[in-house]
Amino acid sequence: MRKIFWLAVCLVLLAGCSGNNTPSANLPSKNNNGTQAINTPGDAPSAVPSADAGSEKHTGTPVAAPAGKVVEIKEKMFIAQTNDIYFNAEDYLGKTIKYEGIFDVYEDTETGAKYYSVIRYGPGCCGVDANAGFEVRWDEDYPASNDWVEAVGVLEEYEEDGNKYLRLNLSSLKVLPARGAEYVSQ
């Protein structure tokens, strides 16, 4: 059941319909000079250096921070940055990630195992079809479900039942008094 939940989250993030009839409007395209053109709605294309000019690997506006720096996921590009981390996990493994979101608990009814995450609600065709964020691991007491939190942790990969998953091994989990945008579309 848990596998289906996380697979559904990833698939909806990849294929969510946000009402934009031009799905390639925000996708990077390669220029002849080895840079990527990043097209954002209402902006003229801009060029940023490509992480790997000859590769088919997905790269976009969000890029991994240099070693020792914190990758901060911002509200305005929450889904894009989260997707970049999932698409290019090898670039982010071992890096510290910081973001805010809704603390959530999922309990597998078959095994009774609990999985904790910090998410935001994403767009979809039929209401809130997807959540964007990460599973989290914390050695201290977890906050209440639906609390608005700031999560800081190192991205790690772990295996369960023969499947690999990403999660943040938290170094900090703070409940914040003010909530940010619960629903994000980019």
Image (spheres, rainbow, N blue to C red):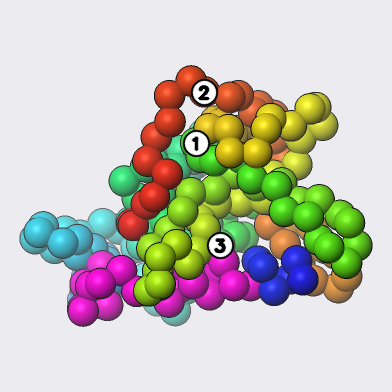
Which residue, given by chain and number where applicable, does mark 1 sit on? 100
Q: Amino acid at mark 3?
A: Tyr
Q: Position of residue 83 (x, y in %)?
A: 47, 61
In the image, the segment drawn in magenta is 7-26
Q: Nearer the viewer, residue 128 or 95?
A: 128
Which residue, given by chain and number where applicable, does mark 2 sit on? 176
Q: Amino acid at mark 1?
A: Glu
Q: Earlier in the sequence, mark 2 or mark 1?
A: 1
- As measured in the structure, the alpha-carbon distance from the residue carrying label 2 to the one carrying label 1 is 9 Å
Which residue, given by chain and number where applicable, does mark 3 sit on? 86
Above or below, 133 relative to 172: below
Whether residue 111 is visible to the viewer of this picture, yes or no, is: yes
Q: Residue at x 75, y 42 (%)?
A: 137
Q: Residues within 10 Å of mark 2 (few under 14, many from 20)?
A: few
Is disc 1 placed on a helix, strand or loop? strand
Contact check, label 2 and label 1, Cβ < 8 Å = yes
Quadrant of the frame with the C terminus: bottom left
**Dominant secondary structure of the residues highlighted in magenta in the image:** helix
Q: Amino acid at mark 2?
A: Leu
